[in-house]
Image (cartoon, rainbow, N blue to C red):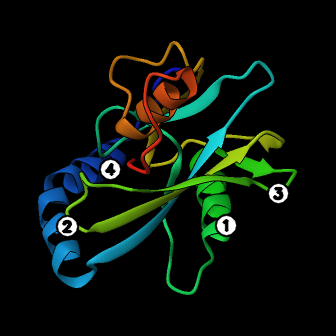
Amino acid sequence: MKAVTRPLHHRLAIQAARTLRPVQRLWWRIRRPTVMGACGLVVNAVGEWLLVRHTYMDGWHFPGGGVKTRESVLAAVQRELREEVGVVATALPVLAGVYTNPADPRSSHVALYRIDAYTMDPKPNLEIAEWRFFAPDALPADVGRGPRHRAAELAGTRVPDGVW
């Protein structure tokens, strides 16, 4: 999929979000010291993983996001996949693991769900710049820690340690 050409007001909103990110991180550190995230390991018929590039951060990552107040982690991953890339699981997602994210200034944990059965109808949005499927042994150079660590664990070159 090619990157989307965005209208000026979308580009301005994205730039504002990037600029305000340090302030947002400080606020989260003070007001939300513990957070929970949910990501999807969406696997296609040939075993490739769905990764996304966000408009507000660098690199390729699993689609997902934060768990809202009074929302289950499973509901959060289903919502995030639907919002970000139009993925709707046709079978119950399977919990692959729960990880701590030491790079986040907050006490951050991520639940990773594997999704093998799904439909996908992506729509352009402000959050996702691009999405693509990659073979686990051929991830892009700028892949994020989560996918990089999971691929290394799969290949047997990294001992699973619960770290995102």
Q: Would you name the residue on which mark 3 appears?
A: 92
Q: Is residue 13 left or right of residue 23?
A: right
Marks 4 and 2: in contact by CB < 8 Å? no
Say which of marks 3 and 4 sits in front: 3
Q: Residues within 10 Å of mark 3 (few under 14, many from 20)?
A: some
Q: Residue furthest top?
A: 138
Q: Earlier in the sequence, mark 3 or mark 4?
A: 4
- Which amino acid, mark 4? His
At 51% across and 71% down in the image, what residue appears? Answer: 67
Q: Residue furthest front?
A: 159
Total numbered circles? 4
Which of the two residues, 77 or 123, is positioned nearer the viewer here? 77
Observer able to see residue 101:
yes
Q: Would you name the residue on which mark 4 appears?
A: 9
- Which amino acid, mark 1? Leu
At 51% across and 41% down in the image, what residue appears? Answer: 62
SS assignment at label 1 = helix
Q: Would you name the residue on which mark 2 appears?
A: 24
Which of the two residues, 41 or 127, is positioned nearer the viewer here? 41
Say which of marks 1 and 4 sits in front: 1
Marks 1 and 3: in contact by CB < 8 Å? no
How far across and how far down the image is residue 76, in percent? Answer: 60, 67
Q: Residues within 10 Å of mark 2 (few under 14, many from 20)?
A: few
For residue 74, the mark is 1
Marks 2 and 1: in contact by CB < 8 Å? no
- Which amino acid, mark 3? Leu
How far across and how far down the image is residue 64, in percent? Answer: 52, 53
Q: Earlier in the sequence, mark 3 or mark 1?
A: 1
At 51% across and 27% down in the image, what residue appears? Answer: 151
SS assignment at label 2 = helix
- The residues tagged by marks 2 and 3 sit, at their Cα atoms, a distance apart of 33 Å
How far across and how far down the image is residue 39, in percent? Answer: 55, 52
